[in-house]
Image (cartoon, rainbow, N blue to C red):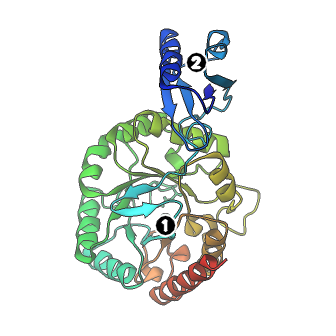
Amino acid sequence: MLIVMHHSATDEQLKSVTAAVEAMGLIAEPIPGSLRTAIGVLGNQGYVDDTSIRELPGVREVIHVSKPYKLVSRDFHPVSSVVDAGGVKFGDGHPPVLIAGPCTVESEEQMIAAARLVKKNGAQMLRGGAFKPRTGPHTFQGLGVEGLKLLRQAGDAEGLPVITEVMRIEQLETICRYADVLQVGARNMQNFDLLKEVGRSGHPVLLKRGMSSTIEEFLSAAEYIVAEGNSRVILCERGIRTFEQATRNTLDLSIVPLVRELSHLPIVVDPSHATGRRNLVGPMAKAAIVVGAHGIMIEVHPDPDRALCDGAQSLTPDGFGKLAVELKRLQSFLETL
Ligand code: PEP
Ligand code: MN
């Protein structure tokens, strides 16, 4: 529920509305804004009878928010959030962030080469999986803690913050020690216990859209993290399952402007997992920037033919260099519009 106050409402009136909400056993969250002052009501598990609130002096209207997500919604937080993750800013007013690196950490040599490549081409964050959610158990599952160390070492060597995936609550503490940003992957988007703990960690999070998730489910998953007091959440569209088999997934780019309408959180796009095909990554990355993504996450490998995971979608060093230049030129052009 959202209580919208009159422009002329006094501090006293705000206080008495807050007290009335609290007397009902609910939480009142002030939502200051230049256009209106409102009070968000949290803690209810169903419809709230608003008769005692509606009539209080200073109240203009009471809006019942039926969405399952509130804290991440624009209703509760009209101003766009800028998320600082490892010193890199994601959100309105900041150029799109380029996150890049291999699918998986494989060796010291591979990570050092990847970090150099990422830095040289102006990307701002290094990715690399150490704990990998692989479809089958007979494939490379990642180097685990050793992989975290190599990722950190490579990031430090080039002055890049690093992001890596957390799959289990037990891994959280260790991953928080090595990584600047936690990634919750598509397969764990609705692992609610993990989301809660990630929320409690207070660490910046990149939350990927589940492969068959609706926008409402996606934002509700983000709500779990924010509800634990961690508002540093970056959403990531990475393609969804459809009947189409020609691409690994179907990139739902319309989610970008739609999420920007519904939520104040930044959203980035991962065209690598969305398409699964190297030659489609560049065009879709550019399209993502045009529709307003706050960043792009791309897989690049020093030698994709030898990659232990996702080689077919990983850009070559040359391909990545070319795309990085094109993305910069595109961004400069968009700024002139
Ligand atoms: C990844 O980014 O390494 C990954 C596994 O992606 P997703 O969760 O989107 O499949
Ligand atoms: Mn991958």
Residue lying at 68% horizontally and 28% vertically, measured from the top left = 66
Number of numbered tags placed on the structure image: 2
Report whether 148 appears left or right of 309.
Answer: left
User: Quadrant of residue 195 in the image?
Assistant: top left
User: Quadrant of residue 275 in the image?
Assistant: bottom right
First in sequence: mark 2 or mark 1? 2
Q: Position of residue 324 (x, y in %)?
A: 50, 83
Q: Which residue is mark 2?
A: 45
Q: Which residue is mark 1?
A: 94
Query: Which one is in front, 253 or 243?
Result: 253
Q: Position of residue 277 (x, y in %)?
A: 61, 75
Residue type at the position of mark 1:
His
Q: Position of residue 212 (x, y in %)?
A: 65, 48
Q: Position of residue 230 (x, y in %)?
A: 40, 41
Image quarter where the C terminus lies is: bottom right
Residue type at the position of mark 2:
Gln
Look at the picture and state if 255 lies above or below 329.
above
Query: Which one is in front, 32 or 191?
Result: 32
Q: Would you say residue 190 is visible in this rendering? A: no
> CA gap, disc 2 to disc 1?
37 Å
Q: Nearer the viewer, mark 2 or mark 1?
A: 1
